[in-house]
Image (cartoon, rainbow, N blue to C red):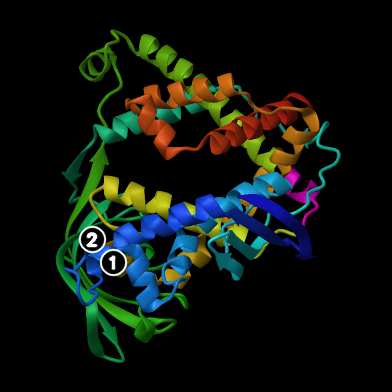
Amino acid sequence: MSLKSSNKVETNRYELVIEIDGTSFMNAVNAVYKKQVKNITIPGFRKGKAPRSIIEREYGEGVFYEDALKELYPQAIEDAAEEAGIELVRDNIDLDIEKADKEGAVIKAVVTVEPEVTVENYKGIAIKPMSLEITDEDIDADVKRVLERNSRLVTVEDRAAENDDTVVIDFKGLLDGEAFEGGTAENYSLKLGSGAFIPGFEDKLIGHTTGEEFTIDVTFPEDYQVDELKGKPVQFEIKIHEIKATELPELNDEFIQDISEFNTVDEYKADVKTKLEESRKTEAENDKERQIAEKLEELLQAEVPEAMYNNQVDSIIDEFSMNLRAQGIDLRTYMQYTGLTADKLRETYYDRAVSQVKVRLALKKIAELEGLGAGDEDVENKYTELADTYKVDVERVKAAFSKKDIAGDIAVSRAMDLVKENTVNEE
């Protein structure tokens, strides 16, 4: 197989004319014959036993040509693109068979390619560094979260409900005086201030006491998921059965010994500080990369084909689907529960996909400009690293990720490291 010509026909679209030699084409034709012959009946022969020459005489010499080309053209186009020095983008391919016979075949394919990219001034990007200081307030806030996880609810009867209390209530929602679906419950536990109910509902329970029955007026948000209730003013009849306050355990050495391997509060707080410092470093590094990515988007000059954005949306959704499956739920069920449509789901991830594509294109160009490509040894080391990470055989990793993709990921990572090393702090 060889590339006869490569011509740009429009922005991000190339026409490739590819010649397939006779031997390769006839081998593919024979392979298709062997697959299909079992389903072919020719008078005088048992089903599946007719020679290829007889079938071709009966149905025409080119009976297997189209299917043979279907087998050949994906790899042929990939090889031709590499020879032409262009990067293919997964998209619709306009394919035309110009010639097909025993001497070989010639196909014309119009394909989508990655855009021409320009990136300048990527060294010296100004960022605002995140402070790495861990304050006493940070430590106290972390300790408080631990106390809250070990808290208990105690019934209070000597005061009215306050924010952060948990109230046990009956409620009945009325729209124009009629109860509406989903608006009624009994003995419902609601933490005030949690934001679990529509705006205004929880606030209007504050100040009321155990045993009290009353009515509140609230309005559903304009973007509420139930069309019949969007923006509608309603009333809720409320009865408070019980008010519970959160009681935190006392922070002392005994408590620390119960919940950790440390003996004293001071030892525990020192460990909290160490862990917060490590977490803050990671957070700061991620924030730095976020700021760099935003700047690279601005610096990128390219007419990006829409197919690249759509393909990235597909990848994000595939990853999301895998994460859902790990939690025991499939994507279709999730969409039914949340009321999402396929179009709405894609819309949700579109902006993220655009950013990811643009940043990768910028980093890929930087890697090219700076000579940061990956060699065979780099790729093999990455395969080994991935195999160790996922605890699978390295051959499984190689089957899942092409050398080209791994090399590209390494180059992009090196480009990001270079940009990070050359940032400057905002004054």
Question: What secondary structure prevails in the magenta region?
Answer: helix
Label 2: few (<14), some (14–19) or many (≥20) C-alpha neighbours in 10 Å: many
Mark 1 or 2, closer to the camera:
1
Residue under the point 68% across and 56% down: 113
- The image shows residue 128 at horizontal and vertical percentages of 73, 34
Mark 1 residue type: Tyr
Mark 2 residue type: Thr
Mark seen at residue 337: 1
Number of labelled discs?
Answer: 2
Quick check: can you spot residue 177? yes
Mark seen at residue 191: none
Q: Is residue 151 left or right of residue 75?
A: left
Q: Is residue 371 left or right of residue 79?
A: right
Give the magenta range.
Answer: 295-302
- Residue farthest right in this picture: 121
How far apart marks 1 and 2 lie (CA) works out to 36 Å
Is residue 30 depicted above or below 59 in this figure?
Answer: above
Quick check: can you spot residue 423? no
Q: Which quadrant holds residue 127?
A: top right
Residue under the point 65% across and 62% down: 111
Label 1: few (<14), some (14–19) or many (≥20) C-alpha neighbours in 10 Å: few
Residue in the foreground of this view, choosing between 305 and 152: 305
Q: Which quadrant holds residue 418?
A: top right
Q: Is residue 318 left or right of residue 392?
A: right
Q: Is residue 367 left or right of residue 353?
A: right
Is residue 391 depicted above or below 111 in this figure?
Answer: above
- The image shows residue 202 at horizontal and vertical percentages of 34, 63
Q: Which residue is mark 2?
A: 209
- The image shows residue 21 at horizontal and vertical percentages of 59, 53
